[in-house]
Image (cartoon, grey):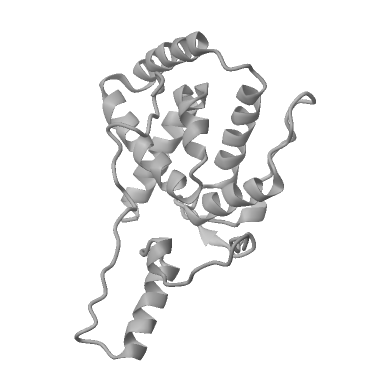
Amino acid sequence: MNDTTVNTESGMTESGSSTVEIESGTFTADQLAQLQEWAEADGWLPEEATGEAKEPGEAEQLDLQTSQPDVFGGEVNGTAYQFDQPADELTAMPMEEQKQIRAAMAAEGIPADIGNEMARRWNELASQPFNPEALTLSHNQGMADLERMHGDRVPEVIKAAKGEAERLIKRVPWLKAALEDTALGNDPWVVSSLANLAQARQSKGG
């Protein structure tokens, strides 16, 4: 992949990827159904393991209203994120994609101010044409800034940021390209913020 600090192809931690296997030998059918319901509600089962096939074209129901605890002890829901309109020459993100990212951020406990700032930086970068040389320069500059901010903790910070990014990507796969194919994944504020979220989550045991 391109020279991107938060690159999800290599060195990515697998936080949030555990699944639950339910054995049928020791539970009744009703108990199995209840266990699976709880596992699905907690996000432990991959979608294909739920046994609920979606009809073609059926949209996923996204919960934007229910408040969730954020990683710093507050609360947030999908309506708390207010994404600014992009520059005039750009097409706004489709509403369904906006709902996806808002629901994912809330489900992962990302505070609204951090989510909104990430969106603002994404809009700013999206207004710039893709330039591989500029992407490489942003990687080099981002690494220099991270070293100035975190010193010898840079590898630890980047690893934590990648793990946090992967949590969101599992919910919203198209974020992978947003981080890897633009300078967003090289932004030292984005990397540091993702690492801080990971650290706060780990402190809570999440």
In percent of width and height, residue 174 lies at: 52, 40
Task: Give the residue at the far right of this rendering.
Answer: 88
For the C terminus, which image quadrant? Answer: bottom left
Image side of residue 60 versus residue 137, left or right? right
User: Residue 32, how many percent across, how many down?
Assistant: 32, 83
x and y percentages locating residue 40 in the rendered image: 42, 69
Instruction: Using the image as rendered, state which of residue 148 and residue 124 is in the foreground.
Output: 124
Is 56 on the left or on the right of 48, as rendered?
right
* Residue drawn at (34%, 29%) of the image: 158
Q: Quadrant of the N terminus?
A: top left
Residue 35 lies in quadrant: bottom left
- Residue at image x 58%, y 67%? 55
Of residues 137 and 90, the one nearer the viewer is 90
Residue 102 on image: x %, y %: 60, 50
Task: Please tell me which residue is depicted at 42% across the width and 72% down the height of the picture.
Answer: 51
Instruction: State the count of labels.
Output: 0
Closer-to-camera residue (31/114)? 31
Q: What residue is shown at x 30% (from left), y 24% (from top)?
A: 154
Q: Is residue 128 above or below residue 111?
A: above
- When the figure is inspected, residue 149 is found, relative to residue 192, above or below; the finding is above
